[in-house]
Image (cartoon, helix red, strand yellow):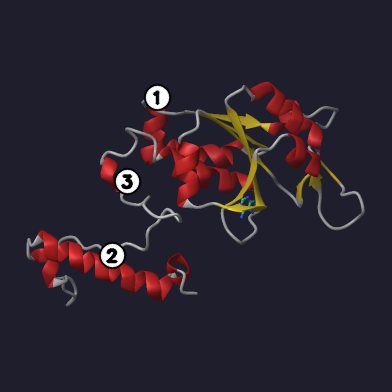
Amino acid sequence: MKIDIVTIFPEIASAPLAASIIGRAVNSGLVEIHYHDLRQWAVGRYRQVDDAPYGGGPGMVMKPEPFFAAVEALRTEISHVILMTPQGQPFRQCKAVELAAREHLILLCGHYEGVDHRVVEALVDEEISIGDYVLTNGTIAAAVVVDAVVRLLPGVLGDERSAEEESFSPSGIGGLEAPHYTRPPEFSGMGVPEVLLSGNHAAIAAWRKERSIERTRAIRPDLVGED
Ligand code: ADE
């Protein structure tokens, strides 16, 4: 898979994706990630990428021309173009699974008040939001999407099951996971549920299922249609 990230802050996107699992995936050639400074496609003495909104209002709007030039330069027949924006569809695990099956993603990152709507109308296949809150820029959101997608690519996670177990339901996360414990069996007066030490795999699976349902109902009733 190839991913192009177009942003005025390439370093914000590259920093979190250079380390750990995603960094290793890049180094071993499982994915190619390219970071592009949108300003290289801006014109004029100041390479301006934003301007005041028509109709008035606070903040600045990102100009269309640099995005059009960027997509023109990067897009091929297999590209899927995404705009990161709080106005997009909520990003879920099932969307990560869908994007992981594509060969080429181009992620456009907004900043300031937003992006000229002609970009959305003419260039973008879909708009994605990583949650109902507003970040200072879409680049952080792009890094989140890339992380969630790349970890699903074959060979990226050491233990292939780790990714498989999450992707059963339409929401992608079938429910919250049961609590996890590791050594020591007693810490600061707190023990570990007996069943996990029993070696009885059927009992452990049943316990995990119950805890998973219990935690999902308490913390994320929306995932089981109970909110
Ligand atoms: N840009 C600013 N906030 C965002 C969000 N929540 N998701 C995606 N892009 C954004």
| Residue toward you, 70 or 160 | 160
Identify the residue at image location x=48%, y=41%: 98
SS class, disc 2: loop
Farthest residue in the right direction? 55
Estimate the x, y position of residue 69 in percent, counting from the top left: 75, 26
Can residue 116 be seen here? The reply is no
How crowded is the residue under tag 2: few (<14 C-alpha within 10 Å), some, or many (20+)?
Answer: some
Q: Which is more N-terminal, label 1 or label 3?
A: 1
Residue 2's disc is: none
Residue type, mark 1 in image = Gly
Estimate the x, y position of residue 27 in percent, counting from the top left: 39, 27
Q: Quadrant of residue 209?
A: bottom left
SS class, disc 3: helix
SS class, disc 1: loop
Identify the residue at image location x=61%, y=52%: 89
Identify the residue at image location x=70%, y=28%: 70
Residue that carries the numbered disc 2 in the rendered image:
178
Residue 164's disc is: 3
Residue that carries the numbered disc 1 in the rendered image:
29
Residue type, mark 3 in image = Glu
